[in-house]
């Protein structure tokens, strides 16, 4: 049952952000007054989240982003040697950064809880699929690398993996970058017109 829920969430994973973006645009309730702190923390979270996401995409490449390839190998190096789901952590950080820009600080814990519940089910689906596909190699990876809390030292699997060129990372992430910039622009326009 959890895997079926995960499959549903996986197929609709972009829907997680829509209600939070709508709240950020439509709600003015209990906004923090400290614009400098809100935007500084928001920018910091965006930078950390984006850096983690780009690092992860550099190691896993298009096959994770676009699902065009069958995933003939398992990415276990780079950020994946510390934690199994760096992309989901990066998405949470980026979402929290955008919420900080909207100055609705009270919305962050709600987003984090809902986000990790959402991603938990997706991960259950992905792990069941990867266990079938990679068998004992993936089971060993699960034993060595935590799902949500990073290791302090990297897991060192055998074999070499080529990283993707930064240009390919940019191409893979350009639409997400534009979406983040569009949300930031809309938040700023809302701030400007609500004065």
Image (cartoon, helix red, strand yellow):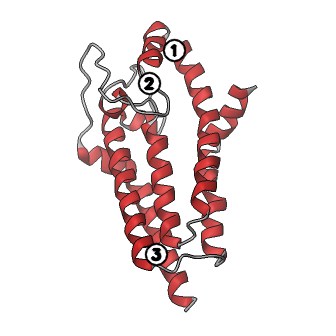
Label 3 sits on residue: 185
Q: Residues within 10 Å of mark 1 (few under 14, many from 20)?
A: some
Quadrant including the N terminus:
top right
Instruction: Name the secondary structure under disc 1.
Output: helix
Instruction: Name the secondary structure under disc 3.
Output: helix
- Residue 149 position, x and y percent, is 46, 33
Label 2 sits on residue: 71
Nearer to us of marks 1 and 3 is: 3
Residue appearing at x 50%, y 68% in the figure: 183
- Residue 175 position, x and y percent, is 43, 56
CB under 8 Å between discs 3 and 2: no
Answer with the quarter of the image where residue 151 lies: top left
- Residue 78 position, x and y percent, is 30, 32
Label 1 sits on residue: 133
CB under 8 Å between discs 1 and 2: yes
Nearer to us of marks 3 and 2 is: 3
Left or right: residue 12 compared with residue 157: right
Does any portion of residue 131 appear in the rendered image?
A: yes
């Amino acid at each position: 049952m959890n895997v079926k829920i995960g499959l549903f969430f996986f197929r609709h994973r972009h829907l997680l952000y829509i209600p939070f973006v709508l709240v950020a645009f439509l709600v003015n309730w209990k906004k923090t007054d400290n614009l400098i702190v809100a935007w500084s923390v928001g920018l910091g979270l965006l930078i950390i989240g984006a850096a983690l996401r780009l690092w992860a995409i550099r190691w896993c490449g298009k096959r994770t982003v676009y699902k065009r390839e069958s995933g003939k190998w398992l990415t276990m190096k780079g950020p994946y040697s510390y934690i199994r789901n760096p992309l989901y952590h990066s998405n949470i950080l980026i979402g929290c950064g955008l919420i900080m820009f909207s100055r609705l600080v009270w919305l962050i814990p709600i987003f984090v809880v809902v986000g990790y519940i959402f991603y938990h089910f997706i991960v259950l689906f992905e792990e069941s699929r990867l266990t079938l596909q990679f068998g004992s190699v993936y089971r060993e990876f699960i034993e060595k690398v935590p799902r949500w809390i990073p290791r302090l030292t990297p897991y060192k699997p055998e074999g070499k993996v080529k990283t993707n060129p930064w240009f390919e990372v940019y191409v893979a992430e350009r639409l997400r970058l534009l979406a983040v910039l569009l949300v930031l622009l809309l938040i700023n326009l809302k701030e400007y017109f609500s004065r």
